[in-house]
Structures are given as structure tokens and as C-alpha cells.
Amino acid sequence: MTSPIPALLGLIAAIVLSGTGVSAESPAAIRVLYDNVARDKQCEADWGFACLVTGREKTILFDSGARGDLLLANFEKMQMRPADVQLVVISHNHADHTGGLLPLLEANKNTAVYLPASTPETLRANVRPNAAGVTEVSQPIEICKGVSVLGPMGREIIEQSLVIETKNGLVIVTGCSHPGLIEIAEKAKAQFKRNIQMIVGGTHLLQHSDEALQGIIDDLKRLEVRKIGATHCSGDKAIARMRAAFGENFVEMGVGRVIEIGE
Ligand SMILES: [Zn+2]
Ligand SMILES: [Zn+2]
């Protein structure tokens, strides 16, 4: 007969681990912590974007929204802890993506921060004393096993995206896609030589005409992007058209969403 004690201890450990925050056992997921698209009534929506990647070697915050108080409140409402963040990746130097960074670092000074090259010295100087390390990214770099920053792109607005390798292909997380959604997808495909399973984040298609939007959708299909979750600065029209074009492979976004990404 097996003793019930080890099983009981295992159960207690599972309860402790699942109480709040994340552990290595957490399912691989992207949690939308900040988005102007409202989804979950508990979380407050506001213009900006941030999401948390869990279930990988490190827990990664991608962007930080506009307001620190709101970012930290949404952490709590999603039963996540700022203290669990190990790496922060900032996509670009716009206040709706960087505004929560310093408040997050005040809550957790053990975090390494990845900023795109050409980030203004004013921001770098504020981050340096409050972070475990600051890396200025100038080319594609793996930040933990299977998770990379694609490196800065664009001419006027320099921006970088996050790439998570999964057994089904690449999962790309974008901030605003100022360098171009299609350009980002093409660079990721060329860099990793793998198919794109999913793109989630801002796609900056607010000003696009119907024809231009159709062109983007055609290009996404040509690149065999399987799923898309357009949000933030994508615009209602672009979101509706992508939802129609991708059907069940359109990923609903919005603050409070948890998107499982698989191993
Ligand atoms: Zn933005
Ligand atoms: Zn932007």
C-alpha cells in the first residue's frame, strides 16, 4: 500500500504554487495585462499595451502600458505578481509602452531590461539604477531558452518584437508594429527559418484603407501566418476584417485575456 503522505505533500505544494504568481509548471501563456481593448470586466482598459509571458525558462513582461498604477492593479486582478517578472522587453519608446516600466522596477529590482538600441538616454538613465541589468538590443538576441528579441527595426520609430519558439512554430508579440506587420513577420521567418504559428499585439493599421488592409491580410496568408490576435493600435476596422478573414484562427485580445501558446 502506498503512503498517503507523499501525495498529501504534493497536493500542498501544488496549492502553494498555484496560489498566486507563476511557477515553472505554469502552462505556457501570454497574459494581456494592459490594452485599450476591453475584455475582462475585472481589468481596467486604457490606451497602451503590456503582456506577460509565462511557462518558459523565464517570466517575461513585454512592454509596460502607460500607467504604472493600472499595470500593477491588473497584475493583481490577473493573479500575477510583479515580483515574478525576471525579464522586461520594451518594444519602443512610446509612453503607452514605457509608462509602467519604472513603477514595475520599483516593485521588482531583480529584473533585467532589454531596450531597443537608440532608446533615449533619459529613459536609460532612469532604468539603470533600478534594474538588475540593462541590455541595449542592436541585433536578434536570445534572452532565455527559446525566447528571443527580434532586434530593432524601422527608420523613424525604432521597434523590436518578441519571438517565442513553440513546437507548432513561432509566436510573435508586437508592440505597435510601427516598422510594418508584414516586415516583422518576414524578418522573423528569415531569422528563425520556421513557420509562424501566431502573431499577437498592436498592428498599427488605424489609417489603412480597405484596399491596404486587404493587402496586409493577403500578405499574412502568403506568409502562412496561422493565427492573428490584432489589438491596441490596430483599429476597429482592421480587427473586424482580420476576424472575418481568419475565422476561428483570429485570437481575441484585450486586457485580462490569457492565450495559451503550447510548449
Ligand atoms: Zn502603442
Ligand atoms: Zn507606438
Image: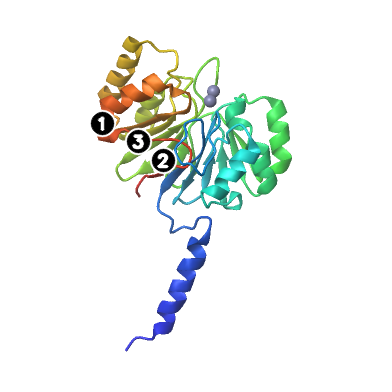
SS state under label 3: loop
Task: Please identify the quarter of the rendering in which residue 238 is found.
Answer: top left
Q: Nearer the viewer, residue 77 or 7?
A: 77
Question: What residue is rendered at 54% in x and 48% in y?
Answer: 77
Estimate the spatial distance between the alpha carbons at disc 3 and disc 2, rounded to whole Å.
16 Å
Above or below for 60 versus 126: below
Q: What's the mark number on residue 251? A: 3
The image shows residue 61 at horizontal and vertical percentages of: 54, 42
Q: Are marks 3 and 2 in contact (CB under 8 Å)?
A: no
Quarter of the picture holding the N terminus = bottom left
Residue position marked by numbered label 2 in the rendering? 164
Amino acid at dot 3: Val
The image shows residue 133 at horizontal and vertical percentages of: 65, 42
SS state under label 1: helix
| Circle 1 residues within 10 Å: few <14, some 14–19, many ≥20 | few
User: Which scheme is used to colour this image of the protein?
Assistant: rainbow
Residue position marked by numbered label 1 in the rendering? 247
Question: What residue is rendered at 35% in x and 44% in y?
Answer: 166
Dot 1 or dot 2: first in sequence order is: 2
Mark 1 or 2, closer to the camera? 1
Amino acid at dot 1: Gly
Estimate the spatial distance between the alpha carbons at disc 1 and disc 3, rounded to whole Å.
9 Å
SS state under label 2: strand
Q: Nearer the viewer, residue 158 or 238?
A: 238
